Image (cartoon, helix red, strand yellow):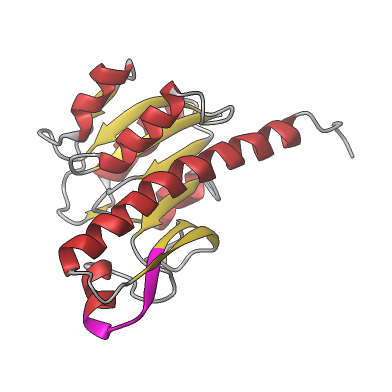
Amino acid sequence: MRVVILGSGRGSNAAAVLEAQAAGQLGRARVAQIFSDQPEAGILSLGAQHGVPSAFLDPAPFKTKLEGPGEERYIEAITGCGADLVVLAGFMRVLKPRLLAAFAGKVINLHPSLLPSFPGLDAVGQAWRRGVKVTGCTVHVVTPEVDGGPIVDQAVVRIDPADTLESLTAKVHAAEHALLPAVIARLSEALRIEDRSPRGN
């Protein structure tokens, strides 16, 4: 299963995926390409470290969404990679229906809360301020509704009395780093089983 990762920042979740791949823990999945919408993003340095092609891909003309010419560039580039799965790992743009239709059901996102609770920005902070006793992270299929697609899997993080916002954030990140590679590995095995099914049934 060929995986394309999209990210905008330092790439800690992408690093977790690549480290799982190096350790033989990513099932039949292999990261084929990393793209970033930020030319100086730390995620781009991960490619050289792990032998995976990485590149800045111009998202213009919009600042917070992927639409118009930028969207077309991403569709063309991802298609050219032969992607079976597109993973959003801190990709800070709203995807629009044209790209989602081009890769229907094949785009997943990692969100730092137990959706449907605390969608949107600053999810860990939202949970902290609300005073809940558990939060976590979610991998979900991306749809036009932001953070509203079908849930693939979740990991629970308990908020202890001694936690600070900083310690809670670190715990959620650790959960994310375990959950995302595990989900990709499981999806790769499901794809393999589907591909080996008899045709025409």
Residue drawn at (25%, 64%) of the image: 168
- Relative height, residue 111 to residue 66 (above, below): below
Is 116 included in the stretch rendered in magenta?
A: no
Quadrant for the C terminus, please. top right
Q: Is residue 90 left or right of residue 4?
A: left
Q: Position of residue 137 (x, y in %)?
A: 40, 61
What is the residue that sits farthest to the front in this orientation? 162
Q: Is residue 103 left or right of residue 6?
A: right
What is the residue that sits farthest to the bottom in this orientation? 130
For the residue pair 175 and 108, the one nearer the viewer reads as 175
Quadrant for the N terminus, please. top right
Question: On the image, which quarter does residue 41 sit in?
Answer: top left
Q: Which residues are magenta?
A: 129-136
- Relative height, residue 154 to residue 174 (above, below): below
Question: On the image, which quarter does residue 75 sit in?
Answer: top left
Residue drawn at (30%, 57%) of the image: 171
Q: Position of residue 3 (x, y in %)?
A: 46, 32
Residue drawn at (14%, 54%) of the image: 63
For the residue pair 119 and 132, the one nearer the viewer reads as 132
